[in-house]
Amino acid sequence: MDPAATGVTVAGTGADPAKTTMFPEEFLKRTFSLINSDKDRNSVSLVCKDWYNVERMSRRHVSIRNCYSVSPEIVTARFPAIRSVTLKGKPRFSDFNLVPDDWGADVQPWLNVFATAYPFLEELRLKRMAVSDESLEFLALNFDDFKALSMLSCEGFSTLGLEAIATHCKNLTELDIQENGIDDLGGDWLSYFPENLTSLEVLNFSTLTSEVSFDALESLVSRCKSLRVLKVNRKINLEQLGKLLVLAPQLIELGTGTFLEELVSGSVNGLENAFSKCGNLVTLSSFWDATLLHLPVVYPVCGNLTFLNLSYANIGPDELEQILSRSKRLVRLWVVDTVGDKGLEAVGSHCPLLEELRVFPVDPFDQQLGVTDSGLVAVSKGCPKLHYILYFCQRMTNAAVITVAQNCPNFTHFRLCIMNPSEPDYLTNEPMDEAFGAIVKTCTKLQRLSVSGLLTDLAFEYIGRYAKNLETLSVAFAGDSDLGMEYVMRGCPKLKRVEIRDCPFGDSALLSGLTQYESMRSLWMSDCNVTMDGCKKLAEEMSWLNVEVIKDEGGDDRLANKVYVYRTVAGPRKDAPPFVVTL
Amino acid sequence: MDQKKTTLDLFNNVDLATELRLGLPGTDNQPEIIKSSLSGNKRTSSEMGSSTCTDENESRFSPPTKEQVVGWPPVRSYRKNILQVKKTESEMGSGMYVKVSMDGAPYLRKLDLKMYQSYEELMKGLQVMFKCIIGLYFEREGYNGSQHVPTYEDKDGDWMLVGDVPWEMFISSCKRLRIMKSCEARGLGDC
């Protein structure tokens, strides 16, 4: 390549350094347009001013993982050409009712700015945001090119908001409503999609409770030839599901309706037939009320499945065995603990390619039910590729977890929830320190860890010493003293998100993280021993941190019962409710 | 701290062993998880002087029940609700609650069809609930000699006379019940 043509200077040519550019702008633009990963783009923007400018002008997607870390004005000023936004709001513990209502994370201020700055916005993905019907209507009316809306764990809206989206978004390709605090007023929002809307590719309304017009749904599915993801709700029965499948054999992901029905044998054949035509199906979910009576209709597609989500279906080990024995290609599996240890043995036997397993509790307070240490070990024996586990159980032993770590050294996400707080090893009565010690020592790629059970400061010492790639840590009812948290804050250089509840960590522990908070997304501490003085001290030391205390009614004023600390370039919140005090 | 060498013998750390608490649940740590409306109950004993703490003091040493802990275990509300509902359903033997209206009555009732094994029992139940008389079912003539006729809406949305189909088929297709006045129901019984 001729150096002069590309503008690259060659050492020793004597060219004027001030006039040299590394590459022409067009070249950079073209190259950067091929870079989609946020991480890569962030790196690229740090190289030099030219690269920063070209990158920011060409970025199409931005992920704001804490809506208060930056303001919409700052975002739109830096990135003028965004078409797709991911926005996350409340701290994760809000999912478990630890954050009061009206805490914030309202999407409207963002929409207001986007309406002017990003009139061509196409995609909005929201997680833990407060979204009102008015906001949904605003979105539908102000962005003509709007294509994809996804909401997970959001609250504040009702089916009226969905009506607005259906009515006005002429180019809608994606409507994905998952596990939100939605006010389902019924009202048949699905019928609001106009007859000429044919662009839908993703439709997920599995978690809505009220009935939708089946005729409208049928017509929609029939005319949207590009539909690849369809997840219906529990009101859709098997017969209706069959009709939909016949219209959309191209589906890649399907969420079923209810299996509760007495089908005539003709219908069963029809359904099996319909499933067998769905050659692209790799994900199946929902399975409401499934029993062995009608589960067999899905057998024709089991062989192709890579993701099976049975977490809404209270099936037992026999049902699970039947499905899994036909699903050898499974990579991800979500189940309820009604499958028991026996069901997990089936997992170990039939799913050698399994990489992710999540086991949810059907009844956290019933000691008799559920899965135990032996189920976990069985899975680890049969699934050496396992790297993601979320496991709710009543009891566990150190020995079992140590074995699991040896069988599956590649864990990136290890989330173990022993449901009785501070529960020791049920065989030895010892703390669970060695269990988590084994995990952090063996699994060097560990990014996310949730600990539980009786834990002393030793467990945290292990974490601080070995978990060098740890990014997310969740702790509850654990530790003996400030030392515990200090080990972690001083030892884990890659921490991004730390959430702690009900631990004896105080001000000293809080302040031990000073050097970390700059590179962390956030810290949550609730019901620990942190005081207002400690928080004030932290706030004084670090001016670009927001140190927020959520006040409870009553309680000691000196205590900081709920503390949320996060880095921000937007300064203190302007929309904080009275119970949120920024120090 | 750095005296611990690389050959970490996980089970042989003498120094820290003395600091390990091997107490069973129910000792100091445990009771701190009790949530009352007061916050911050992790106080040291020296701060336990005030009167408000006496309640906490007592609760500190009673074994906590899991129900008392807010937001634990960490399962999203949505998931908790659906799984709980399903569990209750299975406890009740998949109870089939249907709405029952009676013409002229100011409000509707709800009835669990699973509580009955036959039409006879259902009629008895309805008669008790609504204090009406429904009378006997005749295949040809419907319900004779009474002021009220039981009807139901089936899966297809059609209103049917109760009693024509076998009981099992009825309960699997019945979505709601309506007790009509005989004079209005005449049309249904005629074949």
Image (tube, coloured by chain):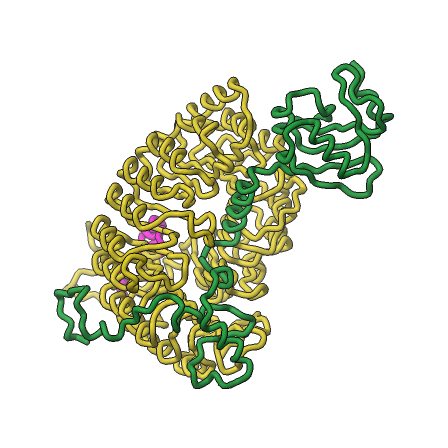
Image point (74%, 34%), residue name: B126
A387 to the left or right of A2: right
Vertical relation: A151 (above or below) A498? above
User: Among the chains, which one is green?
Assistant: B
User: Residue B21 location in percent, x, y?
Assistant: 30, 71
Q: Nearer the viewer, residue A430 or A455?
A: A430
Q: Identify the magenta region.
A: A19-38
User: Residue A219 location in percent, x, y?
Assistant: 59, 29
Occupied quadrant, residue A477: bottom left
Colour applied to chain A: yellow
Q: Nearer the viewer, residue A577 or B96?
A: B96
Q: Nearer the viewer, residue A443 or A163?
A: A443
On the question of residue A37 being in view, the answer is yes
> Is residue A29 in the magenta section?
yes
> Is residue B64 in the magenta section?
no
Image point (40%, 54%), residue name: A58
Occupied quadrant, residue A449: bottom left
Vertical relation: B119 (above or below) A338? above
User: Residue A70 location in percent, x, y?
Assistant: 46, 66
